[in-house]
Image (cartoon, helix red, strand yellow):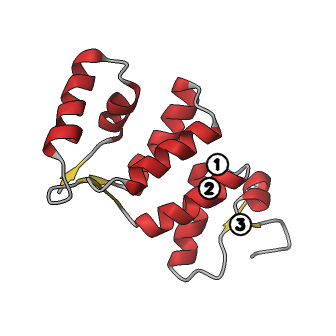
Amino acid sequence: MIGLDTNVLVRYLTQDEPKQARIANRLIEEKLSPDLPGFVSQIALVELVWVLESGYGCNRVEVASILERILRSKSLVVQHGDVAWRALRIFATGSADFADCIIERTGHANECDHTVTFDRAASRSAGMRLLEMGNPS
């Protein structure tokens, strides 16, 4: 297995830097396979979403489609892929940030009763509980 940094995925997906894109293309399309897959950590996945949204102006539908392609790829292994799929479902159908979805779903997968946050939006959209004064959890 070969670990892939976020920037390799970005170059492959955006093709915006020709020299690096060619190298990323060669690696992902010619070297990686089900027998020798690329490894995508959850951190790289979260960074990828952030870069695509903030740096490339991708909308939620575009990002969800890209994440689905990555998760379905036979040549890529996503760390805790089952958790990433669950986070993607929440992200794709709601308004939560992907990072919040991963945080909440990872907690759930690790048998947390719930995940607390000070972020009101995350408490409404990602299934977290709002942590307020007088309400320790």
Tell me: 70 left or right of 98: left
Residue at point 17% right, 33% down?
26
Give the percent coordinates (x, y) of residue 1. 17, 57
Q: Quadrant of residue 135?
A: bottom right
Q: Earlier in the sequence, mark 3 or mark 1?
A: 1
Three-letter code, disc 3: Met
The amino acid at mark 1 is Asp
- Count neighbours of disc 1 (C-alpha within 10 A) and say few if under 14, some if 14 to 19, many if 20 or more: many
Instruction: Please say if 93 is above or below 30.
Output: below
What residue is shown with label 3?
128
Mark 2 lies on a secondary structure that is helix
What residue do we see at 76% from left, 75% from top? 136
Is residue 118 or residue 28 the one in the foreground? 28
Q: Which residue is mark 2?
A: 100
Query: For residue 28, which quarter of the picture?
Result: top left
Dot 2 and dot 1 residues touching (CB under 8 Å): yes
The residue drawn where x is 65% and y is 82% is 113
Q: Secondary structure at mark 1?
A: loop
Mark 3: secondary structure: loop
Give left or right: position of 21 versus 10.
Answer: left
Place of residue 69 in the rendered image (x, y in percent of width and height, measured from the top left): 43, 48
Q: Which residue is mark 1?
A: 97
Residue 30 appears in the picture as rendered: yes
Query: Are discs 2 and 3 less than 8 Å apart at CB?
Result: yes
Q: Is residue 16 above or below residue 49?
A: above
Q: How crowded is the residue under tag 2: few (<14 C-alpha within 10 Å), some, or many (20+)?
A: many
Q: Position of residue 38 (x, y in %)?
A: 24, 51
Query: Dot 3, crowdedness within 10 Å: few (<14), some or many (≥20)?
Result: many
**Which image quadrant: the C terminus?**
bottom right
Q: Nearer the viewer, mark 3 or mark 1?
A: 1
Q: Quadrant of residue 130?
A: bottom right
Q: Please tell me whether residue 103 is drawn above or below residue 10 in the rendered image.
A: below
